[in-house]
Image: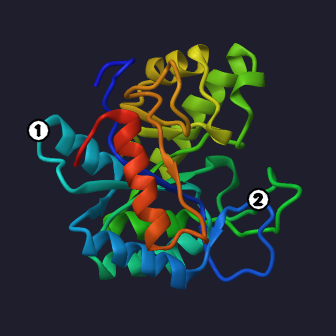
Amino acid sequence: MSRHTAVMPYVLMYHSVAEYRSDPLLVTVSPRRFAAQMAWLRRQGLRGVSMRDLLTAEASGQARGMVGLTFDDGYADFASEAVPILLRHGFTATVFAVAGHLGGHNVWDPDGPRKPLMTAQDLREVTAAGMEVASHTVNHTFLEMADDAGLELELKESRMLLEDVLDREVTGFAYPYGLAGAREVDAVRAAGYSYACAIWKSEHSGRHALARTYVGDRDGPLRMRAKRARHRLQWGRSR
């Protein structure tokens, strides 16, 4: 996949799967809705997979019918709510953990409800269940506001911390807030990540700035179908 690729795999972006009373940042999907969304994918003949599995299949031309499933921030409910539903359908997923806040809370969201984050043990358990753990920086920092030294620290130290926890290589990355300019994309590539997820289509779209489709609690079958169709139109891919 080239840096300015005209083809983009279909990747869904989630954050939290939990019951909720208030969700001003629209980052939470109820377990019931999430289960329905996964069941819808399966009825369409699609299979949810981690980014590692998706990109490996892309490289060998075997990715037909695969959809990347990603979860930003590493919320504890990924382990308790999302993973059991994923396993029920035979799916895998990638969770992007904020390495400096394992076992803590989402302190970077002052206007949103406090949500606990997975512990180191949680990360090991979801990895053992077949999920991919990847990096979301050390502190969920606005990378575009960091100086070069700060940017390098967020990229390299987060990877080192997660690899120490998991005792395995961490190859994926997701940009906090989806912000990925030319400097950030080049730095992620230079840091040795094999891929990185952004959010929006941009001039930097490619292996180290993969676009994703946001999924929320309002997304029933019609909206899921529309979002998939929009991806096909935007990227010229029919899969």
Apparent side of residue 65 relative to residue 37 in the rendered image (left or right): left
Apparent side of residue 27 relative to residue 156 in the rendered image (left or right): right
Q: Whole-percent x and y of residue 28?
A: 65, 69
Q: Name the residue under label 2.
A: 25
Apparent side of residue 21 relative to residue 28 in the rendered image (left or right): right
Towards the viewer: 79 or 93: 93
Q: Whole-percent x and y of residue 27?
A: 67, 62
Q: Whole-percent x and y of residue 37?
A: 43, 73
The three-letter code of the residue at mark 2 reads: Leu
Q: Mark 1 points at which residue?
A: 60
Q: Whole-percent x and y of residue 82?
A: 48, 74
For image coordinates 38% across by 18% down, the residue present is: 3
The three-letter code of the residue at mark 1 reads: Ser
For image coordinates 61% across by 20% down, the residue present is: 181
Towards the viewer: 200 or 96: 200
Residue 237: mark: none
Q: In this view, does 192 lie above or below 120?
A: above
The label nearer to you, 1 versus 2, is: 2
Task: Determine whether the residue tagged by mark 1 lies in a helix, strand or loop.
Answer: loop
For image coordinates 59% across by 36% down, the residue present is: 175
